Image (spheres, rainbow, N blue to C red):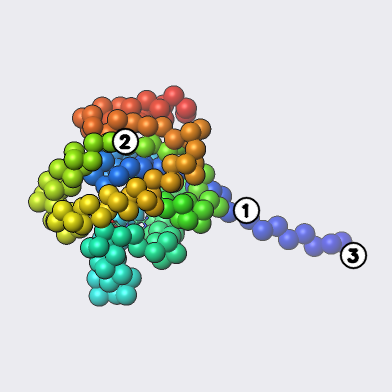
Amino acid sequence: MPRLLVVFPVPMKYRTYLIFGAPGSGKGTQGKILGAIPRFFHCACGDVFRSLDTRTPIGQAFLDYSSRGELVPDEITVKLWMARIADSVGAHIFKPDLDSLVLDGIPRSVSQARIMQDMIEVKRVFHLSCPDRAALVARLKKRALKENRFDDANEATIRARLATYEAESKPVLEFYGPQLVRDIDATQAPVKVLSDVLGIINHET
Ligand code: ADP
């Protein structure tokens, strides 16, 4: 009797660019612009959290952690992110066979990067670098006024977020390593930062 060959579809990994950097480094600004270009799909993890109903347990968890300047636990975060991506695929706004995924705000810890390893094929990590922490604090304070971001509203929370970035997020750069990471001067004008990012993407595609 002929053997029945069962072929399971191999889940494809999303072709991904990561926009990485400290709070206030301009990830969201760049991510939004890239996401407006055909064949790129932008997903900002912070926006996914902010879109949650704050009466739900996960919405509450987001408020609690982010108001302390801490990261939301990794498992919840990646699950939520996966659900958002699945919804976007289902709604045909993200077409993984055609589009590159542009992620900002995730992965934000080495453990998230590990969990996501089977789902994303990282083509480049754009590190929006701004060693001048005072400049970041000034940007975040300005954003608090303009965008009504409660987590930017007081200096203690801002400092806590920068400390969280140093301790938990920055090691993600080592996880991906110098072959994938490109440093970009985040103190430049947004158009110059964009031009640097696009220059690198264009060079490779
Ligand atoms: P920013 O990059 O300016 O800090 P975000 O909008 O990306 O702002 O994130 C706001 C808050 O949402 C973070 O301080 C954190 O509490 C939570 N958050 C966002 N992304 C993640 C993530 N990948 N893992 C855990 N927490 C996250």
Q: Position of residue 52 (x, y in %)?
A: 28, 66
The residue at the point 33 percent across, 31 percent down is: 184
Q: Residues within 10 Å of mark 2 (few under 14, many from 20)?
A: some
Direction from residue 168 to residue 131 in the image, left or right:
left
Please give the label number shown on residue 10: 1
Q: Mark 1 vs mark 3: give the one in front.
A: 1
Can you see residue 33? no
Circle 3 is placed at which residue position? Answer: 1
Front residue of 39/30: it is 30
Direction from residue 114 to residue 50 in the image, left or right:
left
Q: Position of residue 195 (x, y in %)?
A: 30, 27
Looking at the image, which residue sits at the far left?
Answer: 145
Q: Position of residue 105 (x, y in %)?
A: 34, 50
Task: Give the distance between the C-alpha atoms of the residues marked 2 and 3, in whole angstroms.
Answer: 63 Å
Task: Give the distance between the C-alpha atoms of the residues marked 1 and 3, in whole angstroms.
Answer: 27 Å
Q: Is residue 136 above or below residue 105?
A: above
The residue at the point 26 percent across, 58 percent down is: 69
The answer to which of marks 2 and 3 sits earlier in the sequence is 3
The N terminus is located in which quarter?
Answer: bottom right
Q: Residues within 10 Å of mark 3 (few under 14, many from 20)?
A: few
Circle 2 is placed at which residue position? Answer: 129
Looking at the image, which residue sits at the far right?
Answer: 1
Badge 3 element: loop
